[in-house]
Amino acid sequence: MKRTLDFFEVFAEYGRPLSLTEIAKILKLPVSSCHDVLQSLQERGYVYEIAPRSGYYPSLKLQDLANRIVASDPVIARAEIALREIRDELDESVLLARVDGLGATYLLVMEPSYPLRFLRRVGDRLGNLYATSVGKALLGTLDERNRRKAVADLELIKLTDHTNTSKEALLAELEESRARGWYLNKEESEPTVMTVSATFRWNRSVFIVTVAGPVFRMDKQLDEAVAAVLRVCRDLENPGAGQKPG
């Protein structure tokens, strides 16, 4: 198995067709051993010979299998475990939303033990793009041209005394938030509510993880909340990264 993986890594590194002799030399293996592996891969359709004596190259079969595996990945199941851990760590509401266009839908909501909590339900839609950390995070995933266009099309209604109604100030905040990797809403959408969000990408979709709660509790553990959302986004975007083999 390890030897088979070595073959694919060699093709990825060199990025061109390789002959049997070249592969054997690179991997420091007997030509006969390389021939057996190549023959097996060719029989299963994972590599093909470009032309007689012109070298071998992987087919699209491996990519097709990888795409099918990724498409079936239980990202929601993985996210549920990770979000539950953050909820238990911070004892605040933790949410997962999936972006679709300039909107987002909440897919998971983990509630804290406190009766005073941030209320959202699975299936709820994102309220707005400018006064929520989820909305800002969504805008932050856009390239500069589309981000400026989206902000230009917004009507910035004052929802609380802390709502920002300046489009230039919003664009500046988005740039700063993109640079640090997380987005903040402190009483901008609702009085006394504070939320922190970050994003991750999986299978060509954008997801947003949010920690939310009342300001008087969130202020005390803002650093911990930021670290938690950044950690879970990193781990969900790169499953298995950093884990030591068993």
Image (cartoon, rainbow, N blue to C red):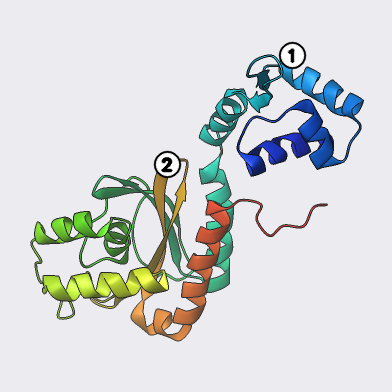
Left or right of residue 211, residue 172 in this image:
left
> Seen in the image, is 24 located left or right of residue 114?
right
Task: Say which residue appears at 45% left-offset and 71% top-offset.
Answer: 114
Q: Earlier in the sequence, mark 1 or mark 2?
A: 1
At mark 1, the secondary structure is helix
Left or right of residue 137, residue 227 in this image:
right
Q: Amino acid at mark 2?
A: Arg
Q: Is residue 49 above or below residue 109?
A: above
Residue carrying label 2:
204
Residue lying at the far front of the rendered structure: 53
Q: Which residue is mark 1?
A: 43
- The x, y position of residue 211, in whole percent, is 42, 67
Can residue 29 be seen here?
yes
Residue under the point 41% across and 74% down: 180
Question: Residue 165's quadrant in the figure?
Answer: bottom left
- Quick check: can you spot residue 116? no
Give the quadrant of the N terminus.
top right
Q: Residue at x 26, y 54 (%)?
A: 126
Q: Residue 199, percent across and down?
A: 41, 58
Other-residue count near label 1 (Cα within 10 Å), few / some / many at <14 / 14–19 / ≥20: few
Which residue occupies the foreground of this view, 175 or 104?
Answer: 175
Q: Mark 1 or mark 2, which is nearer to you?
A: 1
In the rendered image of this protein, does residue 244 appear above or below residue 78?
Answer: below
Q: Label 2 near label 1: C-beta < 8 Å?
A: no
Local crowd size for mark 2, using a 10 Å CA cut-off: few (<14), some (14–19), many (≥20): few
